[in-house]
Image (cartoon, rainbow, N blue to C red):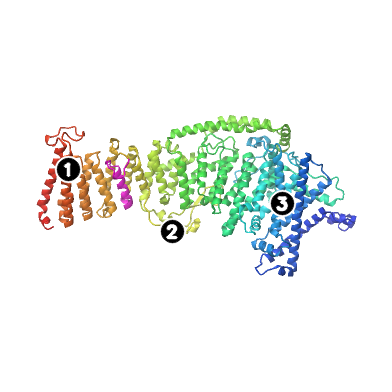
Amino acid sequence: KFSSPSQQSAPADLVGPFSVAAKEGLSPSPTTSLALVDMVLRQSCGDLFGVCFDFYGSCNDDVNNDMRTKNTGVDFATRIIIQTFQLGQSLLGSQYCYHVTKFAMELSLKEASKPSASDLMDFCLFYYTAAMVTTLLTSYLSSDSERFYESFDAYGGVGDVPMSEMALDMMKQLVSFVAEATEAYHKSADFEDGYIFTQSERESFDIGATNSTNNHTASTRTLAQVPSQPLPVSSISNETLWRAFLALDVLNHVVSSHLEQTSWIDSVGGDNSNEKFTASSIAIAASDFATISASNREGILHLLLAAHADDQKGTEAESNGEKPTSAFGDAQISESENSNAAAAVASKVTDALVIDSVEIPLCDAGVTTWLAFRTVLSSVKSLNELAVSNEIDSDARSCLILSGLVNGLFPPSVSMLQHFIRRMFGSPVIVTHTLSSYQELACASMTIPFQSTNERRQAILMSLCKLCLPSWGKRRPNCQLKESNIDSLWTMLWIVHSNYEQLSDEWDIILSTLDQLAIISIWSPKLHSSYAKKTAEIAGCFIRLPTFSTCFTHVTLSQFITSLVKLSEAVSFESLSEQSTDISRENSESTVGDAITDNTNADKESSIGGKLMSWTGGLAGRAFGGATAPSSSTNNRTSFNRSASTGPSQFSKIYSEDLRETACSQMGSMKISTPRATIRKIPLPLLLIAVVTEANSYRLSVIEETVANHLCEIVARSSSAELRSFAMEVLIHFMPLSLSPKSEISLKFGIRPLMVPDREDKNESPLEVHPIEDASKPEASGQPEKVDSPKVEPKLLSVLCQTIQHTTQAETANTTLQALYGVLEGAGHNLSGGNLIIVINTLSVLSGCDSSDNGIVINRSTRQWANVSTLAFQNLKLILDDFLESDSPLKSTEARDAILDCCVAFGRSQHDVNTSLTATGMLWSLADRDSSPGTLDIVLSKLAFLAMDSRPELRNCSVNTLFSCVVGLGDHFTDDQWEKCLNDTIFGVMRGISKNKKSVVYGGANDERYKVAVHHSRDSASKQWATTQILVLRGLERVMRLLFSRLLDT
């Protein structure tokens, strides 16, 4: 390892720690000995653990320590592993105690000690300790059997401390080194200055090109100048930064490849709470370090220098078929300059006898922050991979552990991701890695069916959606989207594409984001030309969304529509002109807000110290192309403000424009006559409700009640005539579909999905779908077999009728009744018993009769409701004349009673006497259709009731109709019916007339509705009641004359 192969034949010329020690006759130093242990472990650790994996991983309850000691190979490997773990644990503990004590002394003396040879030896000792611990932990955590860790603790331990506890303790000690550096940053005077790296800053520094149109990667231009040496950091000591860097490198190895094993050894003791997960502690430490160290201009520019250099090297390595590595072996990141510098010094100190000329190299602060950032990303990526594997083959305990990991990693991850993308949205590398981690964290949280995890998922998507717009929560059409906004939208749409079935309440957040995006111009001066395709695809997602909804299960579709209704309720009950005024006001506010945001850094730069300003100017020149930040940044801000007020944005299409144009054509095919100009102004949620319902019309029963309730609410309460008309026409369109038998496609698919999403690797656009190839195989769509559900009554007509009953506006009632008449003409033959009763009861309510026994609280007897009553009676006649056959629902007691009550209601209506007379005649017609005793008894009682009406025309007509019915059907009366007819009905009418005749006041006609001259025989109420009494006696005489023989037989 430490000798040159070409010189191995000349022992006197050999180099290396052991050859040097042998030549001088000295014992190896601790650093040299640790280097030897590290070398031996790298070469043989895999074999040692392999022996233990085979033995302990297959252990059963009969295994004990005696069996282990009898197996020489297993016993030797176990002892070597335990002793090296004890060594690593002791070294980390002593290093932490030493440096904490040293830091406390320096703090008390208020001065840092000068570098010495002992500091260099300590640095090398910590370097080799970290290297050895990396080898030990990655080897120990490589087992794929949880049984191994339980058995090794039970039978392989030496002493009282189990192996798992030693491993966890070493990771906690490494975390403490990171926390120490974080605290040092936090205590510095200028750790936070509010600096934001914007797109204009990036262009000033010439960092690189924007993201490509690929949805997951970013490409950057070659950096103009890269410094050959790390830049010094004034806020933290070099030694503290080195310890944090080396500790982070070890922890990154652990979380990037062994997250599941780490959770296993956490849960060996039976505690699965997320607070106890070591992975959570690692993420918190790395997140805090990355956030605090990148909270000022110095730290952010250090980080960006490292990030873009690393991204460039990674791109070059991938193009050459290589994979970058770290100092301690294969890793996911390339921090080679920092690691190689440490390795070179450690090797030099180990090889040399005199080290006075060797100095500890500068640790690159930007690389360290970048490593902390990538450690959190590695944790999230490993979590997502674990969630995917757990979804395929899971059990209750695995789900519990995974839920704990999600809950533990969520707070530090989201906190760091938000900080990085808000403070460095001008960096394509940062934005790409951050959004990729957002997507992985969201996908991981969606695989676990626990309430706590669902709340985390909602918070993740809320955080991501707020990154999609400059001012989330406000409808501002003239705000300008940045590149990071477009990338965030792209990520959000792909999350929807891949995880739509796991979304529930999250649809509220997602659809609200799309609603706010809909009115924003596609063109923006803050977007690079390479974003043209991506913005076009995002706009296309609005058109694809209705078709994409046919991929949903019925549960997801119902939740999706519910979320659209919630959004629509906020905007569909005010006039379109008021909405335009609100948007204009918010837009004027956004113009000022954008100007303030653009000038934020200019105001903050003046507050940064001269030392930092002079350094950042030099950094920009060396790293990003030679231009100084302040002047270029100011010029760019001026350009942006000027272009915001003029240029193509005034004529650019908005994101929902293509959807609205498509909807105009679709509304025409749906026979909806709403003008195109109105459709272009209709609130997007309401428009989406219409087009999504049309796309899923083959399974309308799933969503019709929710849709109908909302549309009817708009018809009844919206202050916009255009929206009321549109909602009514949409209702009329879907009513025949609701009442008619199932179509062929409904019979084929039921309520299952019609489409499936394209795979993410098959196209470049989210929300693309293709048809299910074989509907007879539900597994093709990933859905369970169709289950026959009990037949339910269509809800659309029921909801419409309830709206008619509860509206207080005569105009609304008139409009809905016209719509109902059209529905009955086209689909009245499909009315079922339940819907027929609902319609009849609705018509009864609108009759206008003044009664308190039908629950009506709205006074519909006034003159403004007259036309409504007339139209309602036309609907009743249509039903009775055209759709009430001889075998009709009259045989249903409920339907019969509803129809008879409706006729009586119109008979008592005060709006039009002709309507009342016609309704009275309908009772006789119904008795002729159904002459059963039950129906006849009710008809006669209803006629007797109308015979007591205050209007002489109606009561006279009712009396004549009553006796005509008795004479016509009397031959079929039973004895009981005759007794009831004579004693209760006929004589009851006579008693009622006599009573009313005595109670009336003598004088003229009892109302002012008659404006013509009246014969003196009928010019008072008393005379009119007398006339009615005469009609009753004549009718009784008629019955006795024609049916006397039948009465004698009773």
Q: Which residue is mark 1?
A: 995
In magenta stretch: residue 614: no
Q: Is the N terminus in the top left, top right, bottom left or bottom right quadrant?
A: bottom right
The x, y position of residue 352, in whole percent, is: 85, 50
Distance of label 1 from label 3 (alpha carbons) = 103 Å
Residue 407's place in the image compared with 199, above or below, is: below
Q: Secondary structure at mark 2?
A: loop
Whether pointer 1 and pointer 2 mark residues with C-beta atoms closer than 8 Å, the reply is no
The x, y position of residue 860, in whole percent, is: 30, 39
Q: Which residue is mark 2?
A: 787
Who comes first in sequence, dot 3 or dot 2? 3
Q: Is the C terminus in the top left, top right, bottom left or bottom right quadrant?
A: bottom left
Residue 38: quadrant of the picture: bottom right
For residue 832, say whether it is visible. no
Answer few, some or many: residues within 10 Å of disc 1's Cα (few below 14, many 20 plus, some between 14 and 19): few
Which span of residues is magenta-colored? 828-857
The x, y position of residue 817, in whole percent, is: 32, 42
Distance of label 1 from label 2 (alpha carbons) = 64 Å
Q: Nearer the viewer, mark 1 or mark 2?
A: 1
Report the disc number at residue 173: 3
